[in-house]
Image (tube, coloured by chain):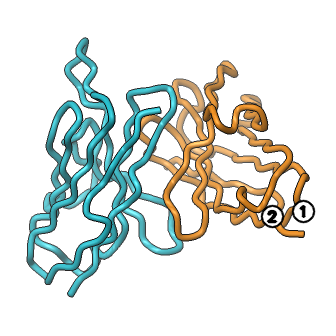
Amino acid sequence: DIVMTQSPDSLAASLGERATINCQSSQSVLYSSNNKNYLAWYQQKPGQPPKLLIYWASTRESGVPDRFSGSGSGTDFTLTISSLQAEDAAVYYCQQYYSTSLTFGGGTTVEIK
Amino acid sequence: QVQLRQWGAGLLKPSETLSLTCAVYGGSFSGYYWSWIRQPPGKELEWIGEINQSGVTNYRPSLKSRVTISVDTSKNQFSLRLSSVTAADTAVYYCTRGRPINYWGQGTLVTVSS
């Protein structure tokens, strides 16, 4: 299985500040034939299923605010929230869909100071 | 609008078989992989396995001996069976669509306890 490692485990930032979450895969999730990174980011709030934010490492899902952005390639990826809002308090997960077995990172809890 | 609605028993005894079904409303059933994912209380997400409309399955290697995912295309439904459950199988179970996953069921808390 491809192991997904997220950092930090949690972070606290003030409203309007930038938050950055990192995700590293144990092997590349870049498919050379189409030059796409098979990496997604999800947001999960308490009592709810996760919500897809970003796919192909940097493509925002329809309806996701543009303060959310994804970057990276190969094995190292980043989710950035450019200006934290109260509603962004949640747990964020990265996921690879490159291999047959889907795997998720351990999650990063974002709190608002 | 695509909706996934799931149901099944929420309380099991050790050694019993977990059984959940997910119905898909709206959108096409074809052309997607339909997965089951679980989340133990307070823990991370774990993919269990997937199936497509032709019945092709992929399973998490560590669960493969106990998992069966099946599909009923006439009803736009797919199902999960997990045999010989233990307390370690206690989790919220979600049915989902796609790679990446853009639709999720509401989740079912399955508790395994004697």
Q: In the displayed structure, would residue B31 be above or below residue B109? A: above
Residue at 90% across, 52% down: B15
Residue closer to the observer: A38 or A86: A38
Real-space Cα separation, disc 1 to disc 2, in angstroms: 5 Å
Q: In which quarter of the image is the C terminus of chain B?
A: bottom right
Say which residue label 2 marks. Answer: B112
Q: The orange chain is which one?
A: B
Q: Do the residues labelled 1 and 2 touch (CB within 8 Å)?
A: yes
Residue shown at 65%/20% (left/top)?
Answer: B56
Q: What residue type is labelled 2?
A: Val
Chain for colour cyan: A
Name the kind of residue labelled 1 in the image.
Answer: Lys
- Residue B111 at x, y percent in the picture: 76, 66
Residue A64: assigned label: none
Q: Is residue B92 above or below residue A3?
A: below
Q: Residues within 10 Å of mark 2 (few under 14, many from 20)?
A: many
